[in-house]
Image (spheres, rainbow, N blue to C red):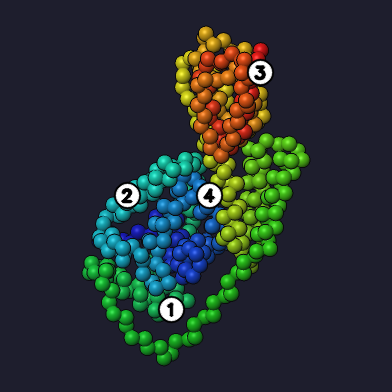
Amino acid sequence: MAPELDLAWLDPSLRGLTRRDASGLGSGLCRAIAERIGVDPVLVRVALIVLILSGGLGIGLYAWGTVLTRGPSGTRPIDSVLPTFTTWSSLAQKAAVVVTVILVMVSIGQVMPLPWAAGVLALVVWAWLRRRKPGAVPQAEDAVDDTEDDELLIGRWRTRMASAARSAAEPARPLPTVDLYSEPAPVEGRKPRPAWLAGLLILGAMGAVGAVLSLALGVTPMVSLAAVTIAGGALVLGYALLARGRRLPRLILVAVTVPLAMSGWLATQAAGPLLPSPDAVTYSVIAGEKTIDLTTIDTTKVDAVEIKAVASDVEVLLPGPVEDLRTTSRLADVTVDAWPDDAKPFDVTLIVDATASNVRLVVREP
């Protein structure tokens, strides 16, 4: 029987990790990792959110991290969901993790295409650095922490015995508790209080940055969104490093990641190629304002005009009404001014692909 697969596969210092506190919205995995590596839980949660936005990589990692670590009861969820998992070879267990994570990323990519290369690279670099760090590997798996209570140790022993007998699905009856000489259980430290005021101030600062850049300075929406994302990330990171005794609420963290998700989505839309056509004139406007003059187009040589706008304001000047107009809009507004009755038709196929943009079609006779 292969040894139990846990998070030590990626980081040796996470061997034998136990999720002691699962009272929040999550499974307690982020807090357990933060306590083991000695950082603020907010940093781990922010890193998880970034990985989630990296093509959904964080979703697969969080799910497997939860089922492969022991909870407060001392048992692993994988032993109840799939009792035969521990009988697989180590290579088969790792292959199952990798394949399912890839399937999750592919499924999410079909719905919302997000960049994933940066997240995968960051994960590989993290695992490589943690493996090279001297002293990162803890004591042997059988070593016992003095602060662990008897119930947790008994739960681990029962799980291991049940796995060895291939009967993890039928746990043994709980042993009687006889506690005559043990010292009182240590009092757990008070949990950090949520800092709602600091979170609201961070959101207010992000809104102020966006308003100043877009309204006062006239910066393009894409640049304003990028600046808001950078400001929010810097403020959250700075607060996590300075205020160790407080934590930002999860709702605030989710709100901070909204501009990050929008930036990633717009980046994928901007990177997409224009529709191929051998006899087409193409225009691409990314995060800007532009007027496209089509009044001088030679319709005898051009069959189609393709315009792609992402986070932009575009005005298209036409020599006459368009008979074949094809539009694709995502969070965009494509408006067509009234055609003059006596204008000559513009005998060209006009294709407009707009994302988070305002596109206006105006007839102006040459």
Q: In the rendering, at what x and y percent does residue 130 appear?
A: 48, 53
Is disc 3 in contact with disc 4, using a CB cutoff of under 8 Å?
Answer: no
Residue at screen point 44% across, 56% down: 62
**Sequence-earlier tag: 2 or 3:** 2
The residue labelled by disc 2 is 95
Secondary structure beneath dot 2 equals helix
Q: Nearer the viewer, mark 3 or mark 1?
A: 3
Residue 13 shown left or right of residue 230 in the figure: left
Amino acid, disc 4: Val
Residue 84 shown left or right of residue 293 in the figure: left
Q: Report how far apart the C-alphas of labels 3 and 4 lie in the structure.
A: 47 Å
Q: Nearer the viewer, mark 4 or mark 1?
A: 4
Q: Report how far apart the C-alphas of labels 4 and 1 lie in the structure.
A: 35 Å
Mark sitting on residue 364: 3
Residue 339 vertical position relative to residue 366 in the rendered view, above or below? below
Secondary structure beneath dot 4 equals helix
Residue at screen point 58% across, 32% down: 334
Q: Nearer the viewer, mark 3 or mark 4?
A: 3
Residue at screen point 76% across, 38% down: 217
Local packing at callout 1 (Cα closer than 10 Å; few below 14, some 14-19, many 20+) is few
Q: Report how far apart the C-alphas of labels 2 and 3 lie in the structure.
A: 62 Å
Secondary structure beneath dot 3 equals loop
Amino acid, disc 3: Arg
The residue labelled by disc 4 is 50
